[in-house]
Image (cartoon, rainbow, N blue to C red):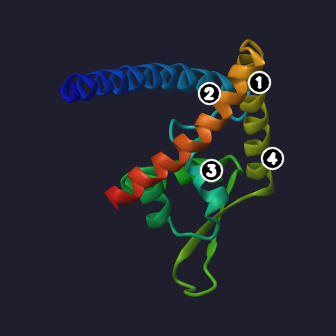
Amino acid sequence: MQRHSAESSTETLREAAEQLATAGEAITALMREAAAPVEPRLPPHGLKVLSVVSVRPGRNLTTIAAAVGLGLPRASRVCAALESVGLLLRHPTATDRRAIGLQLSPEGSAFLERFRAIRVDRMAAVLRRMPADERGALVAALGELAVAVAAVGTERS
């Protein structure tokens, strides 16, 4: 009996993982659509760079490139593009005047706020289509999922 239960548990876990992957793809597509009406149009990794810089202001290009998962030359091009449209600022860091830190410009902060507001509105429209009790269960489960994701990320580091 123990073996059957373990196999059933593995199948259930696999089904849940497949459903989560499918939902993740749908949410990713929805988030991409949310970026469409926000001007200026960004290079593919531009939004990710802005998001990382918003939580890590003043960090250098090497740190931001690693956090976004880009090579240094590509990250430099993305940051240059963001700077050219006025969303990102480069400045010497306080600890090392030779090092260059990155931060959002006021326009960059406003851009990110507009994007995040649209994204939240799109997700709210999706959630309104769910029964209220299921929304509550989803919110609780997402909290646990965030903890599990962080734990897996820590294991890899």
Q: Amino acid at mark 3?
A: Leu
| Secondary element type, mark 4 | helix
Work out how far the residue at label 1 is from the one at label 4, CA to CA, in angstroms: 21 Å
Front residue of 92 and 62: 62
Q: Does residue 42 sit above or below 88 in this rendering?
A: above
| Secondary element type, mark 2 | helix
Q: Are marks 2 and 3 in contact (CB under 8 Å)?
A: no
2 or 3: mark nearer the eye: 2
Q: Which residue is mark 4?
A: 110
Q: Earlier in the sequence, mark 2 or mark 3?
A: 2
Q: Are marks 4 and 3 in contact (CB under 8 Å)?
A: no
* For residue 148, side relative to residue 109 (left or right): left
Q: Earlier in the sequence, mark 4 or mark 3?
A: 3
Task: Tell me which corner region of the image, top left, top right, bottom left or bottom right, holds residue 135.
Answer: top right
How would you rate the neighbour count of disc 3 (Cα within 10 Å): few for under 14, some for 14-19, many for 20 or more? many
How would you rate the neighbour count of disc 2 (Cα within 10 Å): few for under 14, some for 14-19, many for 20 or more? some
Q: Amino acid at mark 1?
A: Ala
